[in-house]
Amino acid sequence: MILQRFLIRLLTMIVTLLGVSVVVFVIIRVAPGDPIAMMLPPGATQADIDRLRALYGLDKSLVEQYFIWLSGVLRGDFGTSISLRQDVLGLVLGRLPATLELSVAALLLAILIGVPLAILGAREQGTVVEAGIDVANGAALSIPDFLWGLVLILLFGVLAPVFHISGRISPQLDLPFATQFYLLESILRLRLDLTADIISHMFMPALALALPLAAIISQLLKISLKEVMTLDYVTLARVKGFSETQVILREALKNAALPTLTLIGVQFTFLIGGTVIVERLFSYEGLGNMAIDAVINRDLPLIQGIVLVFALLFVLINLAVDMMYALLNPRLRHG
């Protein structure tokens, strides 16, 4: 049952990626603007333009361009960036770790904020405390992540400058990193000075991304807990003398967490997409920031590479969540 589900999801993933590649390829080529003209000085001749068009394969038909690009992608060749004149795959993989670290940090913050609020709301249901949590969740959801970013910059970057408001790490520090996973590597190397500096740069963009997701987690988990707490086995736990907090933590939480786990996986993909604007806002050197530069410069190969990598992340995360749900749900696990 699980194997069949996996194969179906894998086939769906392949079809989705092909669909995304076609849509992105067509859209960015029919959009106004000529990337070749942006590369050349004002006095360039038509011969210079034609030569560059031939170099980047833009002199061929749209169908030919797509299949040439797709065959290159299948070989691991995403082309050469028009604006940066570097290998697209190398550029994307160089920025991807920063975005992944930021996204995972935001997800952990969202869980650390949302789960305790949900437990508190379920424990204090029908009281002013639950009403206050609902109001806070509504406020967090009504403000988009980039506006939270502006608020955090004003509070903790200007009025009370506690955290760094731009960049990924202080430029004056010695960086003995072998990979682009700065936070992970600094922890493994026990370079706590670098870890503290990286977290100081990462905290505000991660929190801006985390707050709306924390509100969603809090609301859904609280609703699930309130439903589970009406079941017989929870009532039996109360009869045995467990406190309300013990009932929630020991009995209700594990069964209420399953739908929330699925939601977290789905929302995590949207969180990664939200890094585009937040990274730009905080000048964070991630894939989202590079994507905006690529769009501004009409860098077609780089845009295609970034979008394809984002799409691959989305489908892989959804596949992992679907498989995890199937493993954790006994009804699906045993057919």
Image (spheres, grey):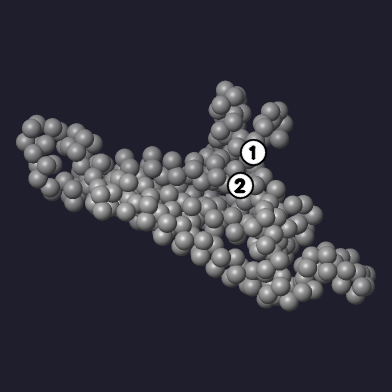
Q: Is residue 255 left or right of residue 161?
A: left
How busy is the neighbourhood of tag 2: few (under 14 within 10 Å), some, or many (20 plus)? many
How busy is the neighbourhood of tag 1: few (under 14 within 10 Å), some, or many (20 plus)? some
Which numbered marker is on residue 96? 2
Amino acid carrying label 2: it is Leu
The residue under the point 20% across, 42% down is 252
Nearer-the-camera pick, 95 or 105: 95
The residue under the point 77% across, 52% down is 86
Quick one: SS at disc 2?
helix
- Establish if 47 lies above or below 291: below
The residue under the point 87% across, 72% down is 50
Q: Which residue is mark 1?
A: 180
Q: In the rendered image, is residue 245 in sight?
A: no
Provide residue 277's location: percent of width, then percent of height.
58, 56
Amino acid carrying label 1: it is Gln
The residue under the point 30% across, 45% down is 328
Residues tagged 2 and 1 counted as in contact (Cβ below 8 A): yes
